[in-house]
């Protein structure tokens, strides 16, 4: 009987401890939720602004970033069905479109990769690329977030020499000369392939939504 | 219960509570430093010490978790069923780690991003578990807190030393908030120090220093 009671005690103890810990953590998450979501939003905004090459203070806090974003960037929906959100950069006080960014999401090697692709107003030349979520192998695929890799996209085109648009970002090894070819990361072939795939997918969608006159 | 009274008055334990407290403190920080002497918890120590600021935050996280888990394990030490004591310890440790992680994510986003998974990995840090199992489970709460603080400081200071050396030699300057210590233009930053091998070099020197000052190399002490 005493063994039985000990067993029951063990189960009750474990359940109580589990419950107390769970309650504590739930409370902590609830308390910090708004702040955390704000930080996440700010992180996204920081990436959009970086891709668009919109100037901002790198020390800026979440509130400041959201203000800068709201003043300079207009969100536009493109297409009627499953609209694509375009982040249009119009510096405050001017009506001129300086750049346009789209979000791309796709599976990476280990987890989802999310990023932004910013284009010049010609919708053809890449202005900037950033990645804001990834779980690639640190030191290899994880290098996609580095400025070194992201800057390789700048000035490249999202169409090939024959002007076949939409499907031709190529991340390949070695120094690249083609207008749509970007030097990849050695040791991270899989990640590069997947990034290439998801970027081409968004470029294709963008082309489709903008219609044939987009060329 | 008698045990608890012994803590408050420190009678029956061969000395004052403060006496044991200081011995415990000295052991955690110096003679039995978790990192430099016991060489525990080096996974996170190698990973986050590329910058002084990261090391300090990691040290704080560790201190908070170690004190919290030691206190609660000690409070529950007479109630935890022996069979599930380790699971109970891990549950307590994990709670404190996640609390700290949530706090970082909400108020120190940049830092949380830089430390990445390593804050969460404090759960598996063998020092915290070791202190709970080896100390808090056998000692009253107040001394257990002292032990947690001692190990937290011991670990944190060791991390800070490694972080300082790596950042200084790896990037030529140490930045901590608004304070900047710059080596100047004559120094060419050695990238290796920021990478994993740099941590091993500094860590080795740290262990050597501890053994040199403490006398003996620990192995001899055992004989």
Image (cartoon, coloured by chain):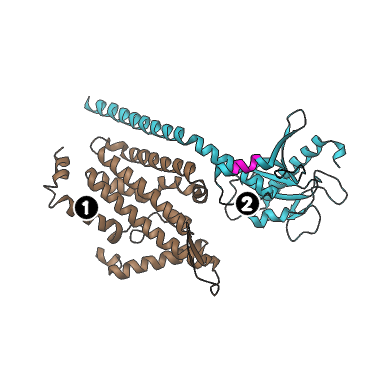
Chain colours: A cyan, B brown
Residue B17 relative to residue A155: left or right: left
Q: Can the viewer see residue B125?
A: no
Q: Name, please, the residue furthest toward the top.
A: A1
In whole angstroms, how far apart are the C-alphas of marks 1 and 2?
48 Å
Magenta-tinted stretch: A65-70
Q: Nearer the viewer, residue B89 or B193?
A: B193
SS for callout 1:
helix
Provide residue B104's location: percent of width, then percent of height.
46, 44
Residue at image coords 85%, 40%: A214
Write the residue at 58% across / 56% down.
A139
Tell me the quarter of the picture where residue B32 sits.
bottom left
Q: Secondary structure at mark 2?
A: helix
Residue under circle 1? B21
Q: Determine which residue is flagged by label 2.
A: A145
Asked whether, in this view, residue B201 is left or right of residue A123, the answer is left
Q: Few, some or many C-alpha atoms within 10 Å of disc 2 (few <14, some 14-19, many ≥20)?
A: some
Residue B100 horizontal/vertical position (percent): 42, 43
Q: Depth check: A163 or A122 in front?
A: A122
The chain under label 1 reads B
Residue A68 among those drawn in magenta = yes
Query: Quarter-wise, where is residue A29 in the image?
Result: top left
Q: Which quarter of the image is occupied by the C terminus of chain A?
A: top right
User: Is residue B98 on the magenta stretch?
Assistant: no
């Amino acid at each position: 009987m005493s063994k039985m009671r000990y067993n029951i005690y063990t189960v009750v103890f474990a359940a109580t401890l589990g419950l107390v810990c769970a309650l504590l953590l739930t409370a902590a998450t609830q308390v910090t939720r708004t702040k955390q979501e704000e930080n996440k939003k700010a992180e996204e905004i920081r990436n959009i602004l970086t891709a668009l090459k919109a100037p901002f203070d790198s020390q800026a806090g979440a509130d400041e970033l959201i203000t800068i974003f709201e003043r300079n960037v207009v969100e536009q929906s493109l297409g009627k069905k499953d609209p694509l959100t375009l982040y249009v950069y119009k510096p405050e006080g001017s009506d001129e479109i300086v750049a346009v960014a789209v979000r791309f999401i796709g599976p990476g090697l280990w987890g989802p990769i999310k990023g932004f692709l910013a284009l010049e107003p010609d919708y053809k030349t890449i202005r900037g690329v950033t990645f804001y979520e990834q779980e690639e192998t640190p030191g290899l695929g994880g290098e996609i977030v580095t400025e070194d890799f992201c800057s390789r996209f700048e000035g490249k085109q999202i169409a090939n020499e024959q002007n076949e648009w939409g499907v031709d970002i190529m991340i390949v090894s070695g120094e690249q000369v083609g207008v749509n070819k970007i030097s990849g990361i050695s040791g991270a072939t899989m990640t590069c392939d997947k990034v290439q795939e998801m970027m081409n997918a968004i470029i294709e969608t963008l082309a489709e939504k903008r219609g044939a006159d987009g060329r | 219960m008698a045990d608890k009274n012994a803590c408050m008055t420190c009678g029956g334990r061969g000395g004052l509570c403060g006496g044991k407290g200081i011995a415990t403190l000295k052991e955690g920080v110096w003679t039995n430093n978790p990192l430099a002497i016991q060489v525990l918890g080096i996974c996170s120590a190698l990973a986050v010490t590329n910058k002084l600021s990261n090391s300090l935050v990691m040290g704080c996280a560790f201190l908070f978790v170690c004190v919290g888990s030691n206190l609660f394990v000690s409070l529950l030490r007479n109630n935890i069923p022996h069979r599930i004591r380790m699971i109970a310890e891990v549950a307590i440790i994990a709670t404190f780690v996640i609390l700290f992680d949530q706090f970082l994510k909400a108020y120190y986003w940049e830092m949380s991003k830089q430390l990445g998974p390593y804050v969460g990995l404090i759960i598996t840090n063998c020092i915290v578990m070791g202190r709970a199992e080896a100390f808090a489970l056998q000692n009253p709460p107040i001394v257990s807190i002292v032990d947690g603080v001692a190990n937290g400081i011991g670990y944190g200071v060791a991390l800070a030393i490694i972080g300082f050396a790596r950042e200084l030699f790896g990037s030529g300057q140490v930045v901590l908030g608004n304070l900047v210590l710059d080596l100047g233009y004559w120094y060419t930053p050695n990238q290796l120090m920021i990478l994993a091998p740099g941590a091993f070099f500094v860590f080795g020197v740290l262990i050597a220093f501890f053994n040199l000052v403490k006398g003996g190399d620990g192995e001899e002490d055992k004989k």
